[in-house]
Image (tube, rainbow, N blue to C red):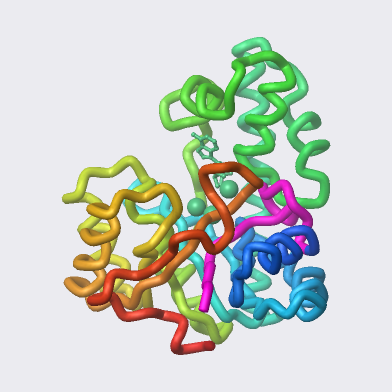
Amino acid sequence: MRIDLHSHSTASDGVLTPSELLARAAEKEVDVLALTDHDTVAGLAEAAVAASKHGVRLINGVEISCTWEALEIHVVGLNIDPTHKSLEQLLTEQQEKREARARLMAERLEKAHFVGGYEGAKAIAGDAPITRSHMAKWLMSQGAADSMGKIFKKYLSRGNTGYVPPTWCTVAEAIQTIQAAGGVAVLAHPTRYDLSNKWIRKVLSAFAEQGGDAMEVSMAQQSPQERATLGQWSKDYQLAASVGSDFHYPSQWRELGRQLWLPKEATPIWTRFI
Ligand code: AMP
Ligand code: MN
Ligand code: MN
Ligand code: MN
């Protein structure tokens, strides 16, 4: 069975609509797909219709941005009830924070002589909550740099002109709210926070202590060594293991459902809901 429990659509910063995403999942022979947009569940209704059309099992998901020790940590909620009131409330607050942050980012970018960032990013985001990806795409259109990577490095990452320190909810709030909505809380991509192993272990330990259920062990573009280490850590911290491409757009590097096997010592999270 091919399973992918982390993906994005145009409801956040992905480039495929939920329908297009599910069509691609079917084409790539994915049996189970979780749509986990940033701080929104707005794509799930359309995804559900497309999933039944294509014979793909859809898992309702969300990826919540959190603050922990001044770091930005992402927590994925899987098998959530998207209509649950406290989840809805938390996501509304997160979306308001995204809106305020986008305005602040734009103000800061004006100092670097990029005028109109809020309107620009908003036009690209459409109905989606504004992410740094949208701001980056607008900066590209203004000729700020020729790749997303360079834009993030130069303008949007910690310490740069357009960076606004986050005010996201705490990891504990995200875990509690996801679980209240009937879901499981998964620490997203532990190796993608630019942290030393010592700090990744601290994050995992805190996440487990606060009642988190699982951590992502298998991701796209990952070395066998990294996967093995994460498998071992999932055992050490008694967290179940999840798998996810974090697909945002078609490319040769990251594909839905591709090579997401788990090391044998890891305990899959999906047996709790599949
Ligand atoms: P936000 O949640 O608004 O802070 O936006 C973060 C999003 O920006 C991530 O989910 C990625 O999709 C994207 N992102 C982060 N870093 C980079 C990067 N170096 N290059 C391209 N996209 C990035
Ligand atoms: Mn993203
Ligand atoms: Mn993420
Ligand atoms: Mn993601």
- Front residue of 40 and 259: 259
Q: In terms of depth relative to the viewer, which is nearer, 222 or 135?
A: 222
Task: Identify which residue is drawn at 77% across, 22% down.
Answer: 116
Question: Residue 15 lies in magenta, yes or no?
Answer: yes
Residue 200, placed above or below residue 89 = above
Residue 55 position within the rendered picture, expressed as x and y whole percent measured from the top left: 73, 80
Give the answer, above or below, for where 136 lies relative to 249: above
Percent x, y of residue 231: 26, 67
Q: Is residue 17 magenta?
A: yes
Residue at x 21% of width, y 59% of height: 229
Question: What residue lies at 53% left-to-right and 49% top-to-bottom?
Answer: 254
Q: Can residue 170 be seen in this view?
A: no
The image quadrant of residue 45 is bottom right
Q: Relative to 158, is 92 on the left or the right?
A: right
Q: Where is residue 271 in the image (x, y as percent from the top left)?
A: 44, 88
In the figure, is residue 150 to the left or right of 117?
A: left
| Observer able to see residue 145 | yes
- Principal SS element in the magenta part? loop
Give the magenta range.
1-18
How many circles with numbers are drawn on the protein?
Answer: 0
**Residue 10 horizontal/vertical position (percent):** 74, 52
Indicate which quadrant contains ligand 4. bottom right
The answer to whether residue 137 is left or right of residue 174 is right
Image position of 123 (left or right of 152): right
Q: Nearer the viewer, residue 121 or 225?
A: 225
Query: What residue is rendered at 82% in x and 77% in y?
Result: 53
Q: Nearer the viewer, residue 93 or 49?
A: 49
Residue located farthest toward the top when viewing the structure as drawn = 113
Quadrant in the rendering for residue 42: bottom right
